[in-house]
Amino acid sequence: MRMKRITALALAGCLTASMLTACGNANSTSGAASGSASAATTETAEVPADAGLHNLSDGVLDIGTTIKWDSLTPLRSQVGNNAPWAYQVYETLAVLNYDKEYKPQVAKNWSAQDDGLTFDVEIYDYVTDSAGNNITANDIVWMINLSKEAGLKPCFSKVESATATGDYTLQIKMTQDMVGAFEAILTNTFVVSQAAYEASGDEFATQIVSTAPYVITEFTPGSTMTIEKRDDYWQDPELVDPSYAANVDKITYHVITEASQAGIALETGELDGFMTLDANTANQFVGNPDFTMIDTPYINGYQMFFSGDPSRAIESDVNLRQAICYAIDCEGLITGVFAGYGTKMHDSAANTAVGYLEKWAEEDYYPYDPEKAKELLAQSNYNGEELVLLAGSNSTSQRLTQMIQGYLAQVGINVTLNLADQALLTSIRLDGSQYDMFINTVGGDWLADHWSTRYDMNAYATGDACARHDEVLAEMLYSTWTKEGYTEENIDAVHAYIRDNMYGFGMVQPNNIDIWRTEIGLTEPIRTNKGSVNWAASVYNA
């Protein structure tokens, strides 16, 4: 039996104590993967000498997105972590590219000690931010510890300690042997000067001083952000990897959550491109030579997670949870919400995650069966009360939740929709007492990432991401996501436990659709690890 993205044999070869890079070369069709080296190098592909964008009449590349940030703080949850500007205004120790390779950014190199828990990191000794502050190992250690204290990203809870061992060297010790855990620290630690952060007055809520090649010149929370290329960027051009190159002088990002408005903005020329365009809107541009579109399976699926808080009756009612899943027509969602751009899921994790088993696609994973749903509902403790379905407020979420509400009504389940803006969603998403069901789009480069984010009862102060405390599942996770325990048998057991207890239901893995006006001359789209176009790093011919 083969794992998705990597065979078990290759996985065993990759997951040694010295494993430091993801196993992988991926593409949007097969998603195949292969082994990679055990230590970071500074070798990079060559960035074209003139890859920049120069033909815009106003000098600004205008890009639309549905993702919004209400604050610029570097202390961020997973919500909005795929914003198109995130890694253009903040740098990290390393970058995971579209081919699932870890590329050094602020880190020069790193290595693992024999215990598999301790890692030594060296950063470049000439890193400076936009205010001229020199970045040292102490700044990195401070940010790791600050992120750990904030408790917003589960990956930092896996850090036991971070210690500076020199001006530009540090040591990171993890709490447990977990595949991808150290690498997550490399890609999630935003690099900023402690002195600049503490002197800012608002902890970078409205303005950032960072090491990134861009500075923010205008920011309206939840609306627009303009970034401009620095002329004093610290890194030598030959050491800049194409995955995070800065080939555009000025970009303005526009938050447009209404799909029809996004389409109009593209048609009128208000926007030059759009990241993750609604599939129904994208259909109107098919065959139009004035626009170029690309789509690829997204690493984040649309999932329904069930509250694990004891105050909600659904927490202890597996029959009700399963009935809900059988009542939802995922193929109908693909057609009605995503215009056919997507596939039915067979796990709560997307099939792009390292460790995903291909055999799951053959499983009878909660097929649409209203009669089965009614049978399970009759065996449940449900008495017609209103169940609360929490989701975001963008147009896709609105259509998705309305269809789900309709499907559930057909089998006798009453649902109230709570479509929250991003600020509210972020504040209540971990509080399982606020909802019965929660629609989210949670990815993960490894299955272990997904499990850690959603199902680890020790990840958050409230329990797992839905306030559940399942000790059996926790022990399964802790023994499976080790380098030795990450086997097909163990992975399959975790999958079956989550499926049978129905803590998280994978519904639709959509295709990510990016579109741009052909006239801007984008000839080589550079993709992020999530599949979206990196507008700053892409290559242009004008």
Image (spheres, rainbow, N blue to C red):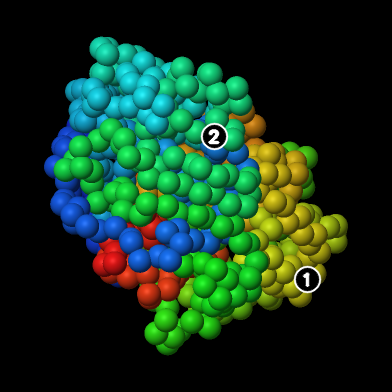
User: x and y percent of residue 526 in the render?
Assistant: 31, 59
Left or right for 280, reference 103:
right
Left or right for 403, reference 416:
left
User: x and y percent of residue 280 in the render?
Assistant: 56, 77
Q: Quadrant of the C terminus?
A: bottom left
Q: Outermost residue toward the bottom?
A: 287
Asked if residue 395 is positioned above or below residue 196 in the image, the reply reads below
Q: Outermost residue toward the front?
A: 57
Asked if residue 39 is positioned above or below residue 396 in the image, the reply reads above
Foreground residue among 334 and 248: 248
* Residue type, mark 2 in image: Gln
Asked if residue 234 is positioned above or below residue 67 in the image, the reply reads above
Q: Earlier in the sequence, mark 1 or mark 2?
A: 2
Foreground residue among 424 and 274: 274
Judge whether residue 349 can be spotted in this image. Answer: no
**Camera-nearest label, 1 or 2:** 2
* Quarter occupied by residue 41: top left
SS category of the residue bearing label 1: helix
User: x and y percent of residue 477 in the render?
Assistant: 44, 39
Which label is found at residue 207?
2
The residue indicated by pointer 1 is: 409
Q: Quadrant of the N terminus?
A: bottom left
SS category of the residue bearing label 2: loop
